[in-house]
Amino acid sequence: MTLNLILASESPRRHALLKQAHIPFTVVSKHIEEVMDMQLPLQQCLEKLAFQKANAVFADYPDDLILGADTIVYLNGQILQKPVDREDASNMLHALSNQKHVVYTAVCLLSRHKKITFVEKTYVYFKLLSEKVIQDYLMSGEWVDKAGAYAIQGQASVFVDHIEGDLHNVIGLPLDTVIEKLKEFKEIVA
């Protein structure tokens, strides 16, 4: 039996990464309240959230393979999720300026017979950002709906001095690891 891969995410970046890898998939996203269980260690908290996203879709598609994911930016012990407004985005970019931060993406692959969760970690080193650079970026609107208020694959690529780890992870899905984990679901024909 062949499982269909369902991406439990409306993220255009995740869609593009799966298409780039020529992995056939369908998008089905359910809105869940994203509450982080901060009683857990960070990585377990993120894995739990990715599972909740996958499980919400799995309830309606139990014969398929569901991929849920969640990406956060982590700076000096603080989680930078999607900014709520322009001021929030500005504060995030000022905080990230000339700093090293970590991007975590948690992934859950869920089928009737197997569940795999993992977290990929990438270090991102930002250059010193001038006020003009930050304000110009805010005017672009690219920061909207992006963890940490930036899109590394877009105009914000100039903010980055270098990274240690998987660039795809920063974009929103650690593609190489996902492809490896998909092989553990033998029913899938990629």
Image (cartoon, rainbow, N blue to C red):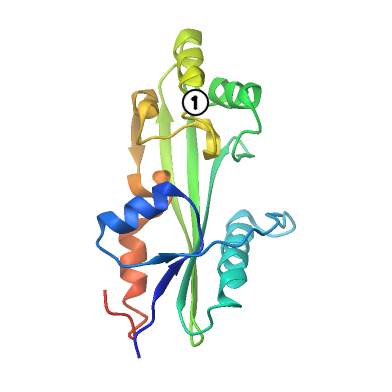
Residue 109 visible? The answer is yes
Q: Residues within 10 Å of mark 1 (few under 14, many from 20)?
A: few
Residue 72 is left or right of residue 6, and the answer is right
Query: Toward the viewer: 148 or 9?
Result: 9
For image coordinates 26% across by 59% down, the residue present is 21
Residue 79 is left or right of residue 170, and the answer is right
Give the image location of residue 65, x and y in percent: 45, 76
Give the image location of residue 41, x and y in percent: 65, 57
Is residue 142 placed above or below 3 in the rendered structure?
above
The residue wearing badge 1 is: 141
| Residue 144: quarter of image | top right
In the rendered view of the protein, which quadrant contains the N terminus? bottom left
Amino acid identity at mark 1? Gly
For image coordinates 59% across by 26% down, the residue present is 89
Q: Residue furthest bottom?
A: 1
Residue 165 visible? The answer is no
In the rendered view of the protein, which quadrant contains the C terminus? bottom left
* Mark 1 secondary-structure assignment: loop
Give the image location of residue 15, x and y in percent: 38, 54
Q: How many marks?
A: 1
Query: Toward the viewer: 112 or 159?
Result: 112
Give the image location of residue 166, x and y in percent: 34, 48
For image coordinates 66% across by 33% down, the residue present is 84
